[in-house]
């Protein structure tokens, strides 16, 4: 080694700064961790307070509300993200139009949600439970997600992650208040508290957006319906995607009982906390891939494969940790959930499959292929319905987990088949 080369290398290392993708992934991961801590504490409090049966009923209703919420705000967020990447100066005006679209789409989405509650929840659920939860998820969460998409389009993942953490903070506050101030915790009391916290959180988000938009008004209804309709393809994609992973909670309740639904939902939520770093990476990847595809600013294939390799390595490590410490995590929720101990290997497999299919999924988003993605996950919904009807009544919790693994494997395989075909079409000659 030449004299001074070591000092030169050290000096260059000190001058090194992580790239924008790395910084944005770090910012998104930081806020994902904040969100994860809030949701973990919220999950721990509610699961212990309500017990498996009431918790299973709550998750079943919340899952339906979240699915309907994607139909209202999912496509609007994608449009805001794409248009913001192409023209950052137009984001404030697009945000105002997006708020109006959420308002005009709410009645249709809420009506579909009410129908789903009536058809899929076997026990009669009181209006004081499903109506507040529906309002908070279908209208208020859609506004928060749209605001975060606008910031994500300009690769401001720090602010975007902060806005996405606001609803999680609201849920945690509702659970803390329920445990501290309500003598006998009930689902009705929690639903009212969640709605109140969601209203407060949305007020914070709207105030922030008004400040970022230099005092513009909140809503513009002139083009709202047209904007909502333009995003309907992406909304359908999000709806189908979320239904493929969340509808099973309601179907377990329908095909078995509330306790089994509570066990399964808790295990699934624990697993999804291990997927949060992948979610952060996906958030950072989206604007990068949109730019590479739309204006040929780089290689989407190289970006996708590097991300997939990183996710594979992380997923195997996370699955190892879950297998080693999963029983300790479950024990924190009390002995009532001890039946989950035997399911940990299946949840580890589910984690790896889910993480890897997310990378193919974000490429389909960026490639403007909403209906292709919706078709893949639409078949997965059919698999969930059939497998749940066949396996859950016979095998209970094991059948519910097998249903999730089957549907996620289908999405993983066919998402990657389509993603590889798209990438091959963009490869330069001779590559």
Image (cartoon, rainbow, N blue to C red):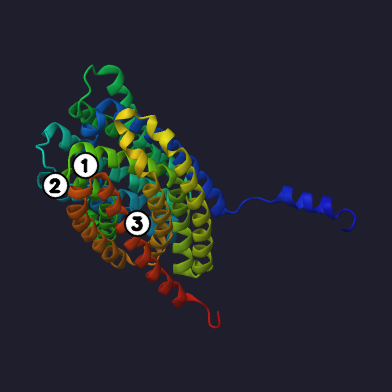
Q: Quadrant of the C terminus?
A: bottom right
Q: Residue at x 53, y 82 (%)?
A: 429
Residue with the mark numbered 3: 78
The one of 4 and 225 positioned closer to us in this rendering: 4
The one of 295 and 170 positioned closer to us in this rendering: 170
Residue with the mark numbered 2: 120
The one of 269 and 171 positioned closer to us in this rendering: 269
Check disc 3 and report its element: helix, strand or loop. helix
Residue with the mark numbered 1: 60
Does residue 420 sit above or below 289 in this rendering? below
Does residue 258 sit above or below 95 in this rendering? above
Q: Residue at x 46, y 76 (%)?
A: 424
Q: Are marks 2 and 3 in contact (CB under 8 Å)?
A: no
Check disc 1 and report its element: helix, strand or loop. helix
Tell me: 141 left or right of 225: right
Report crowding for label 2: few under 14, some 14 to 19, many 20 or more residues within 10 A (C-alpha). Answer: some
């Amino acid at each position: 080694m030449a004299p001074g080369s070591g000092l030169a290398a050290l000096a260059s290392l000190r001058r090194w700064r992580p790239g924008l993708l790395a910084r944005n992934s770090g910012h998104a991961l930081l806020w994902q961790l904040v969100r994860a801590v809030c949701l973990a504490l919220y999950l721990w409090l509610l699961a212990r307070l309500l017990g498996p049966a009431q918790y299973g009923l709550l998750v079943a209703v919340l899952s339906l509300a979240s699915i309907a919420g994607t139909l209202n705000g999912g496509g609007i967020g994608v449009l805001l993200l794409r248009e913001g990447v192409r023209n950052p100066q137009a984001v404030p005006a697009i945000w105002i139009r997006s708020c109006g679209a959420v308002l005009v789409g709410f009645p249709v989405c809420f009506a579909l949600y009410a129908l789903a509650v009536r058809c899929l929840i076997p026990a009669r659920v009181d209006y004081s439970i499903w109506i507040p939860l529906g309002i908070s998820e279908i209208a208020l969460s859609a506004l928060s997600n749209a605001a975060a998409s606008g910031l994500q389009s300009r690769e401001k993942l720090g602010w975007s992650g902060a806005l996405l953490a606001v609803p999680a903070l609201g849920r945690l506050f509702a659970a803390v208040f329920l445990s501290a101030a309500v003598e006998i915790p009930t689902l009705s009391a929690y639903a009212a508290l969640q709605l109140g916290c969601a209203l407060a959180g949305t007020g914070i988000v709207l105030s922030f957006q008004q400040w970022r938009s230099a005092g513009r008004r909140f809503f513009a209804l002139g083009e709202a319906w047209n904007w909502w309709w333009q995003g309907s393809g992406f909304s359908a994609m999000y709806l189908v995607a979320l239904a493929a992973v969340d509808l099973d909670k309601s179907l377990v309740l329908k095909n078995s009982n509330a306790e089994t639904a509570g066990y399964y939902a808790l295990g699934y939520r624990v697993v999804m906390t291990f997927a949060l770093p992948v979610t952060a990476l996906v958030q950072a990847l989206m604007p990068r891939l949109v730019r590479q595809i739309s204006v040929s600013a780089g290689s989407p294939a190289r970006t996708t494969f590097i991300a997939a390799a990183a996710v594979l390595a992380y997923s195997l490590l996370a699955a190892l940790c879950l297998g080693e410490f999963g029983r300790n995590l479950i024990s924190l929720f009390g002995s009532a959930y001890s039946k989950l101990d035997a399911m940990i290997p299946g949840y580890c497999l589910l984690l790896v499959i889910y993480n890897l299919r997310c990378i193919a999924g974000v490429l389909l988003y960026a490639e403007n292929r909403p209906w292709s993605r919706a078709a893949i996950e639409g078949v997965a919904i059919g698999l969930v319905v059939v497998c749940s009807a066949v396996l859950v009544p016979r095998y209970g919790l094991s059948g519910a987990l097998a249903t999730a693994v089957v549907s996620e494997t289908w999405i993983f395989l066919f998402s990657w088949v389509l993603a590889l075909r798209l990438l091959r079409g963009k490869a330069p000659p001779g590559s």
